[in-house]
Image (cartoon, grey):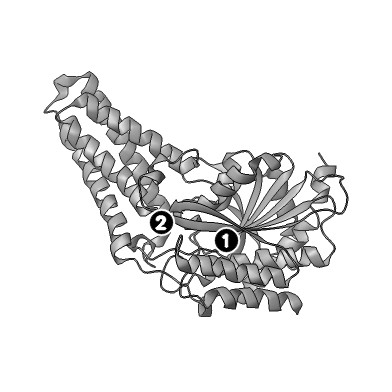
Amino acid sequence: MIATTVLDQILDGLAAFPHRTSTTESEKKAAEYLRGQLQALGLSPALEPFTAPTTFSWIYFILYFGFALAIGVHYFSPILGFALAVLLLALFVGEQLTWFSPLSHLVPRGPSQNLLARLDPAGKRDADRRLVLVAHYDTSKTALAFSPGSVKYLRPIFLVSLVMIATTLVGLGVHLFRTALQGHALEYMLLVPALYFLYASALMVEREVRGQPVQGAADNASGVAVAVDLMRRIKEAGGLPGFSVWLLLTGSEEVGMAGMSAFLQAHGQELDRKKTIFLNFDNLGAGQLTFITAEGMLVRLPADPELVRLAEQLSREEPFEDVSGRGYHALTLDTLVARARGYRVLSFMGLNEHGVPWPWHWHDDVLANVDRELVQLAAEFAWTLIQKLENLFHSR
């Protein structure tokens, strides 16, 4: 009963905010609320400030409009058009893999903060082992791409974007090295990606002009509730043998996982890549409880194979028979940042038959639509998995 009380308390408390949009005063107040809740559990959380883009829309507007501009420029200067497209490709890949994000410093930025609480082991043995429980507490806003009829097509739309980028680079490259093709049908074919990128740019503008902040009960008050409840369980059990346990509640995840990037920049030197495990909880409001076997929109980055095997074993036991594993490539998660840097990760989500969360970045992401039994199941499954983590190191 205590676990249910903590889960409900965090769910209800975060959903009481109209929104927790990244870098806003509401996000800061939500962080203060969570700090108070963690202090009430006997933890000593620290707020760690950083700055982040106020939205991801303008970053991708620059990228998409830039590709359309490169196509236009090439009619006057093939070299300049091709060079611009190659630069944009590098920036696009950097954004997707979280390697670098220079464009994030060209758009409006604001203050944000992570919340970090630690439980260190009683002795020094294996003190370099880390279990990091992760959930983002910020929320997003609505956009046409996330409307109920469109959200299941996010992955196909992204693949179309990749085709359009490839078509652009091939077309501009051919024109650069074979100027005799000027006036050829290829010239007119480039109008297709040009129009597509203009449309994609318009979608980014629409999100900023018409998008409304969402309550974010599923995304991601549900994940925060699970992460906090797990930290409570570990503390009441006297810690986790062999591990220093960190609870990381990230801000500004919705603007390109900025909170996770800031955390790793600040604490990366303290974390051994082979001995640090990130368990991430995101959007557990409805659907089927799913452990994410691989993530990444551009490149498939697998979760830690030993963590996946452990989750698969548990999913064959009662009462977890309905839990399953699958890849998630519709959008990005905080663990993408850690996985791209070589850490051991596993994420948990609630996914529907289309492999996407629901509710998600839409007006229906409210407390009334959260399946509290799913949230409870996620907490129980993760708790059972955590109690078996020590076996991963004994088996290595």
Figure check: 64 above or below 79: below
Residue 211 relative to residue 377: left or right? left
The amino acid at mark 2 is Thr
- At horizontal 58% and vertical 68% (from top left) the residue drawn is 32
Residue 146 relative to residue 68: left or right? right
Across and down, in percent, residue 349 comes to 58, 61
Tell which circle, 1 or 2, labels the residue nearer the N-terminal end: 2
Secondary element at tag 1: loop
Image quadrant of residue 275? top right
The amino acid at mark 1 is Asp
Q: In this orientation, which residue lies closer to the viewer: 165 or 337?
A: 337
- Crowding at label 2, few (<14), some or many (≥20) Cα neighbours within 10 Å? many
Kindly identify which numbered label has been placed on residue 358: none
Figure check: 390 above or below 70: below
Across and down, in percent, residue 214 comes to 43, 70
Across and down, in percent, residue 101 comes to 44, 41
Residue 122 relative to residue 96: left or right? right
Q: Give the residue number, with chain letter if any, for mark 2.
A: 54
Image quadrant of residue 55? bottom left
Secondary element at tag 2: loop
Q: Give the residue number, with chain letter if any, for mark 1.
A: 282
- Crowding at label 1, few (<14), some or many (≥20) Cα neighbours within 10 Å? many
- At horizontal 33% and vertical 30% (from top left) the residue drawn is 86
Q: CA distance from mark 1 to mark 2?
A: 20 Å
